[in-house]
Image (spheres, grey):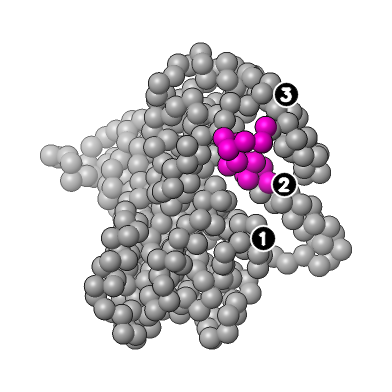
Amino acid sequence: MYEKNQGLFMPANLPAEAKSKWRKVMEAKTPEEKLAALKEFMSAIPKHKGTEKLRMQITRQMASLRREIELRKRKKAGRGEQFFVEKVGDIQVVLLGFPNSGKTTFLKCITGANVRSNLSPFSTKKPQPGVAIWKGVYFQLIDTPSIMEGASKGAFEGNRVLALAKNADAILLVIDATVDPLYQFEILRKELEESRISLTKPRAIVKIERKRHGGIVIIGNLENTTQQEVISLLREYGIYHAIVTIEGSATLDAIEEAIFGSINYKPTAIILTKVDQGISKEICEKFARKVHPIPVFLFSEKTCKSFSFDRVAEYIFASLDLIKVYTRNPRTGKVEEKPVVVKRGTKVIEIAKIIHSQLYRNFKYAKVWSTRFKFNPQKVGKDFVPEDNDIVEIVS
């Protein structure tokens, strides 16, 4: 079954021969070995409607490996080009869109980055970063070369842009309101889903981390299946030691699908541009209803100064389930203006480790100021879990 809005498919029950060949794929040490193993695996997959999605996915993996092998050859020959963007700040957000959708204009407006923008299609040749700050949280926005239909298969080097999206924390789809915005959205969504990137949170996110020993450890909730059934399934694919992490509730089909590669969920919002060019409020509202639950933010170059990035930042921050923890210097009593950004549920000892390794190693206790407390501060141990906007002082 294929769920359109989640980019998921349930893999068919494969014959023993195919499962055996998949073991060779997982055991491959180099891209060349993996490519050869995938070819063998593909030959063992029965051809029928139930395996169409799986065959498409394996085909994309093979194409990606061929490009990787070719890129490595080019780099050895001195012709490689740097495309990866190292994360700077707290949250990395990639801008994706069609040619002339307004990505560069939006980046310049929000971050003040000194980048050129013109009307020539595909004028952005490589990623261009900029930084926006919201409540002390640093957002790294990355303008990317335009993508179009076929990007996931390598058209216009779209696979490299999609790789940036896969590595980022969140995505902004930049869509031109004057040129059939729904069509642009559907193409972008399709290309992302074919690269195993989901724009809406799936019912279950499953990650399988293979280990050398320890057996099968399942962390999370199972749905309509048992731990023993999961262990038996993984063993059929030659997986005897692994940590299976489940966010949500996973069926046996979802576990099997994760064997072939996890779904990458990326919180996503839409920047609908050029809304000042004769676009009615009704058209914008209709588009927003069509793409729900993905939020839509209206933008135009003329209203750049009045555009509130705060709403976008707040949505991404909440979708990533992050919190801001402010640190207090025990000597001066000064509270740092820039917060430490961590996942909700992070313990105070982990925050100490982020601040400095010595605070982590010599941790005694922490003082916490919070609106939840009747009296402030309170002395807490290493397992205490701060909430958003709490102030923490580490004593070592």
Which comes sooner in the sequence, label 2 or label 1? 2
Location of the C terminus by quadrant is: top left
Label 3 vs 1, first from the N-terminus = 3
**In 3D space, how far apart are the residues under numbered discs 3 and 1 (Cα atoms)?**
31 Å
Give the image location of residue 261, x and y in percent.
59, 39
Which residue is outermost to the left?
374
Q: Secondary structure at mark 1?
A: loop
Q: Tags 3 and 1 in contact by the CB under 8 Å rule?
A: no
Residue holding disc 2: 62
For mark 2, give the secondary structure.
helix
Q: Is residue 232 above or below residue 28?
A: above
Q: Nearer the viewer, residue 282 or 94?
A: 282
- The disc at residue 17 is 3
- Residue 221 percent across, percent down from the top left: 40, 25
Q: Which mark is residue 154?
A: 1
Separation of marks 3 and 2 at Cα, in angstroms: 20 Å
**Amino acid at pointer 3:** Glu
Q: Quadrant of residue 172?
A: bottom left
Where is residue 149 shown, x and y percent of the image?
Answer: 57, 64
Residue that sits furthest to the front in the current view: 48
User: What range of the chain is rendered magenta?
Assistant: 46-59
- Quadrant in which residue 298 is drawn: bottom left
Instruction: Report the disc number at residue 385.
Output: none
Q: Residues within 10 Å of mark 2 (few under 14, many from 20)?
A: many
| SS at mark 3 in the image | helix
Residue 329, x across and y down, in percent: 35, 51
Write the residue at 75% across / 35% down: 43
Q: Amino acid at mark 1?
A: Gly
Residue at 18%, 46% (x, y): give it.
371
Can the viewer see residue 28?
A: no
